[in-house]
Amino acid sequence: MKIRTLFLGLIAAGLSATAVAADPIVIKFSHVVAQDTPKGKAAEKFKELAEKYTSGAVKVEVYANSTLYKDKEEMEALQLGAVQLLAPSLAKFGPLGVREFEVFDLPYIFDGYEALNKVTQGPVGAQLLAKLEPKGIKGLAFWDNGFKSFSANTPIKKPEDLRGKKMRIQSSKVLEEQMREVKSLPQVMAFSEVYQALQTGVVDGTENPHSNLFTQKMHEVQKHMTLTDHGYLGYAVITNKKFWDGLPAEVRTQLDKAMVESTAYANQIAKEENDKALAGVRASGKTEVYTPTAEEKAAFKKALVPVHKKMESRIGAELIQSIYKETG
Ligand code: LMR
């Protein structure tokens, strides 16, 4: 009797008898950062809401910290259908042939979360997500992380301090150009390998939002960090289009609802999580955190903004202009 009541309750909640009675649909959600980060927490929130709203018809398995796939493999796995959800950084879509996402990597293109959210949560963001469809990928949402600081083992007070340094970057041509602009040597490397590369001196420095630096303990192997806020790092939540379109409609509706709510959560906690991480770095006493003066910030900006023009042919002048307009 009890089971029958539960079953009828689930159907009343909008899920068909087939969706409820069948084995749960398993969604593997793979990502490369720690659980205790904006993305890690939002992935857990999605799991909680998706399982709740589908009354268990969907089971979400979250694999944090590259335990399932590293950066490059996760994209391939999604296209092959071995994993169903990812939230790669916007800097990692170039190798897939979607260069427009690298617009988010342009130094100083956003002066804060408000400007950024006008783009990600508005029409330009929707147009960008639609560019994934020919690749068999459906873009579901943008999740915020934060603004990046440079770090190294020597002080970085001016752009010249980065000269000659081997700097780890994500797989973005814009970031490559950014590092070349200050005459440093960019090295593309999977996120899971960065700590060790910094520890062993394979690279000298890197750039991160504070949540990533702190949760990977990179501050333990970087003596200096400067709050340059020179660029943004955030995510597109993506799924395999065939998988998503093939879901029972009522299940997809509930998952869409879970995604909308976990996106609001992600974007609400991002700044707070990064502030907490910065406080953690300071408290550790391992890294000297330097706040540049207004003049020093202006010097970084002057050195890096020419990247916009140089990358115009790769990203599209029109797209860059539409972002200036949206945020201006
Ligand atoms: C990085 O590789 O530095 C980031 O993209 C990691 C992440 O997912 O935040």
Image (spheres, grey):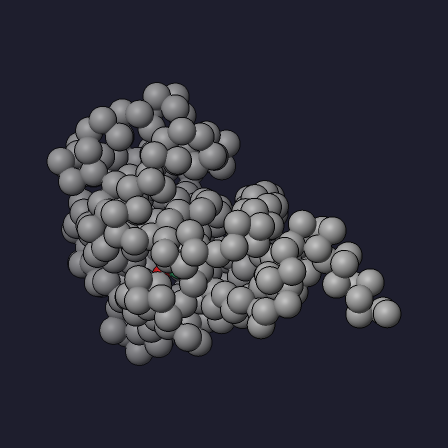
Pinpoint residue 103: horizontal percent, then vertical percent: 28, 39
Q: Is residue 284 visible?
A: no
Front one among 219 and 255: 255
The image shows residue 189, relative to residue 320, as above or below, that is below
Which residue sits furthest right? 1
**Residue occupying image coordinates x 29% and y 42%:** 131
Please give the name of the residue rendered at 42% of the width and 52% of the height, measured from the top-left corner. 245
Name the image quarter holding residue 102. top left
Residue 233, given in percent of the width and then of the height, sits at 40, 49
Image label count: 0
Quadrant in which the N terminus appears: bottom right
Where does ligand 1 appear, by image quarter? bottom left
Q: Residue at x 48, y 68 (%)?
A: 28
What is the x, y in percent for residue 200?
Answer: 31, 78
The quarter holding residue 299 reads top left
Q: Position of residue 324 (x, y in %)?
A: 33, 25
Q: Quadrant of the C terminus?
A: top left
Residue 19 seen in the current view: yes
Residue drawn where x is 58% and y is 50% of the image:
250
Which of the 4 image quarters holds residue 35? bottom right
Q: Nearer the viewer, residue 178 or 51?
A: 51
